[in-house]
Amino acid sequence: MPNIIVKGGSRPPWVGLAAAVWVEVAAGNGYTFPLYSPALKAVMGLNQQQITILGVANDIGESVGLLPGIACNKFPPWAVLFVGVVMCFLGYGVLWLTVSQTVVGLPYWLVWIALVIGTNSNAWFGTSVLVTNMRNFPLSRGTVSGILKGYVGLSAAVYTVIYNMVLKDSASNFLLFLTLGIPVTCLLMMYFIRVCTPASGEDSSVHVHFLFTQAASVLLAIYLLTTTIVTDVFSLGNAACYTLVAIMVVLMISPLGIPVKMTLFPAKKRSTPTSASNLVAAPVAVEGDSTPPTEQPLLVQSSSAAYLGSFLENEDASDVETLLAVGEGAVKKKRRPKRGDDFKFREAAVKADFWLLWMVYFLGVGSGITVLNNLAQIGIAFGLNDTTMLLAIFSFCNFVGRLGSGVVSEYFVRSSATPRSVWMTVAETIMVIIFILFGLGVDGMLYVATALIGVCYGILYSVMVPTVSELFGLKHFGVIYNFVLLGNPVGALLFSGGLAGTMYDIEASKQGSSTCVGHECFKVTFLVLAAICGLGTLLSIILTIRIRPVYQMLYSGGSFRLPQTSSH
């Protein structure tokens, strides 16, 4: 791997986090499928199962991130982002040509592939900023994950506001915005997403900065929900709409206030025996530092240890360098990693905990994505004419689940070493209850069920991220994390495309129409999803019991500490 320049100083990690907010919102474009899927269905003359299979393509694209995961260890973040920019432009460009009928008669298979390519940009965007920020804030993984994944959850509401208030419910104009607007945004943010000297998690100011960022995201979420309700109830003029959108943009910029504050009111420097920057021992250059990389301070003072592995090293030379270090006594002889150490993918893939985590995630998120992909049809089946509000509610509650689970899991993991998977158990238990009530057609459940499933979906997404990093380390986090993410498209293919789409068309045919009305349309689907989440709950309990000792080791002192064998 080429020598990566590490940006020194205390401000760059926060500048990168502020820029990552915009990239993560861009990375949520996969949630917009319900906004333009009716137009695709009408223009191409598709039935519900065909449109559901396009929804599966949407999920496959945004969740297949093995290549971005590998690329994050080989290339700088800007290069990974740039690949996403190209894929976004090409994929959504074809969809725009289809819906706008600029090109007539494009085959179904080409549209399917274009949707996979367009939404796969999410994997490149999200992996780049998530991996970079997890490494820039290694002692606050749950908090960072909650913030970044929270903004992804809010993205659907952001796009809904743009779709309704700026583009006036035009699917064609919206796809043109996705084709051009997202790539331009990510190109502008590209310079600021970079590897930095890790921020100290023990500094009290870091805690305050995270609180500010979380408060800003909560304020944005409340504002988006309020704006969606106002526009749904009242008819607003163009001037009012544009003003509301401008306020939304200001709220999205607000995390930039942290580095601005640090510039205007710099904190006094304190000398500490060990700083968080020492957590990364790698032969990398710090920008603005004339000292050669091999002369930087290291965790272990040894002539060969200067070349020992961090996540930035070239893997090909690691075995030889480890042998040199062993000869000098700098490290112990190489052994298989234990949970909490840095795992390569093939080492993680033979662990029972890895597959338990994958199954829990697959069963829970697969059920949640089934609801999201069919949200418009669910709303119509339950008597709604405009399902935009359902998407806004799901988006807001998805955000609450993501941000809230990051905060809550971080508190309990530090105070009592509670495994984060506990919250996955809670989420899937709630989903079991909701799906049973939903399937039985209990009156008044539509909005409540949508909200609670949104919260649970967000919890499962957000909690999985730091759990992977804590069990299997940060060195190959991008690859391992993205493999777990494959549970999303697999679940969508089986539960949404296979189960929900088929049962909907069967019920619609009984009614003699292509549109199904009544709770019977999704009754079987919801009851099966309840059983699936029940299995997920059981597996999550087993996983929690197994990994409890790992969390007691990592958080025994009330804060995260790297295992002695870790090469961070």
Image: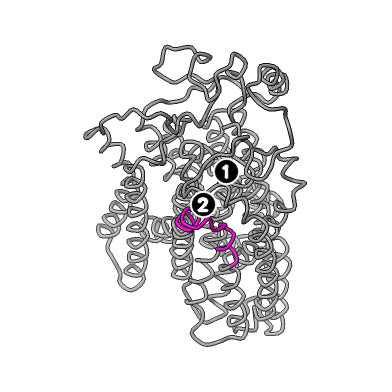
Picture coordinates of residue 434, whole percent (x, y): 57, 77
Q: Is residue 177 visible?
A: no
Looking at the image, the residue that sits furthest to the left is: 264
Picture coordinates of residue 258, whole percent (x, y): 30, 41
**Quarter of the image with the C terminus in it:** top right
Would you name the residue on which mark 1 appears? 121
Relative height, residue 464 to residue 292 (above, below): below
Q: Is residue 327 visible?
A: yes
Would you name the residue on which mark 2 appears? 29
Near-viewer residue (382 or 50): 382
Q: Within the magenta stretch, is there residue 412?
A: yes
Q: Within the magenta stretch, is there residue 234?
A: no
Picture coordinates of residue 523, whole percent (x, y): 65, 81
Q: Over which residues does the magenta segment extend? A: 409-425
Relative height, residue 292 to residue 238 (above, below): above
* Residue type, mark 1 in image: Ser
